[in-house]
Image (tube, rainbow, N blue to C red):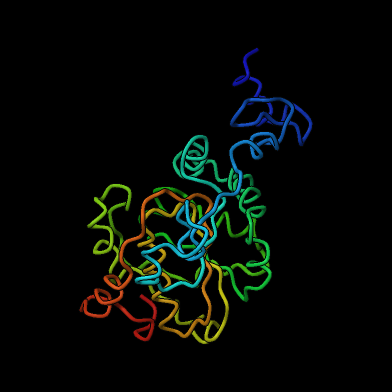
Amino acid sequence: MGLFDLAALIQRGAFPRGLSVCSICQAWPAQAICSACIERFAQPLARCPICALPGFAHPCPSCCASPPAWDQALCAVDYSFPWDACVARLKFTGDSASAADLAHVMQHAPGVEPALEWADAVLPMPLSRERLRERGFNQALELARHLSPGKTIRDALLRIRHTPTQASLPRAERLGNLIGTMVVHPAHANALHRRRVVLIDDVMTTGSSLQTAALALRQVGVQHITAVVFARTDTPPLAPDTVRSSVADNPHHVSHRLGSP
């Protein structure tokens, strides 16, 4: 019997609960992501405390020159082997159960547990209705539920316009792709005023999605925003001032004051 056959039997419940094959090294019996792989591939790195870009013990030049709309960013791992495959399995194969394993890695990353404890609310990055229908679930919501089930508000942020995936777009087009796409649900606007929130997402590349969400939260007076992501690329952030001015000047931007979409 091969390891993949064994994994299939375990998933079907043919073995006692708790036995599993590590999805990275294929060790058995083990956790779905074993402690040896976490220790090997998830070692903490020096990161910019604002955008989590690797290689900086202090705020990176981009964040010093033009800080984003959020206050702090925390990240568990680089978006590289073997974690890129773990993210793909979560997002594109319908394996929503693997969110628990990624959340476990996130929770033990430096600074994440204190940020979750300090926060008043934990907000997943939203998907459009079309993307949610296509995928079947919101991977950011699944991560948030495992990280902080009692504080997670699933629909505080709404994505009101469907757009091409960010990964499919050139870097320079990512900001324009998101203008006017996210708002705070009116039912939660007052409750979030002057509160501390944690924004949850799976991957951060340029930060344009998080920036769009953070700007919407600032509109309703959110006091402090910490972005927590599972993986971060080594792509420098786009200039946040460009986003801020673009959103403010764009006539199609929808404020939370206009009510539910």
* Image location (x, y in percent) of residue 67: 39, 72
Q: Is residue 258 left or right of residue 144?
A: left
Where is the N terminus found, in terms of image quarters? top right
Q: What residue do we see at 42% from left, 62% from top?
A: 60
Q: Position of residue 18 (x, y in %)?
A: 76, 36
Residue at the limit of the structure toward the top, as seen here: 1
User: Does residue 150 sit above or below 12 in this rendering?
Assistant: below
Q: Tell me if residue 100 comes above or below residue 57 in the rendering.
A: above
Q: In this image, 114 relative to 128: left or right? A: right
Which residue lies at the image location 75% right of the left edge and 31% below the top edge?
A: 19
Q: Residue at x 63, y 36 (%)?
A: 40
Taking depth in this image into account, of 211 and 239 the one nearest to the observer is 239
Residue 115 lies in quadrant: bottom right
Q: Position of residue 173 (x, y in %)?
A: 23, 57
Residue farthest to the right, as pictured: 16
User: Where residue 55 appears, x then y in whole percent?
Assistant: 47, 51
Q: Along the line of sight, which residue is nearer the eye, 37 or 217?
A: 37
Left or right of 74 in this view: 7: right
Q: Residue at x 69, y 34 (%)?
A: 36
| In-front residue for pair 55/115 | 55
In the rendered image, the vertical position of residue 167 relative to residue 56, given as above or below: above
How many discs mark residues in the rendered view?
0
Decide: is 167 above or below 197. above
**The C terminus: image quadrant:** bottom left
Q: Quadrant of residue 128?
A: bottom left
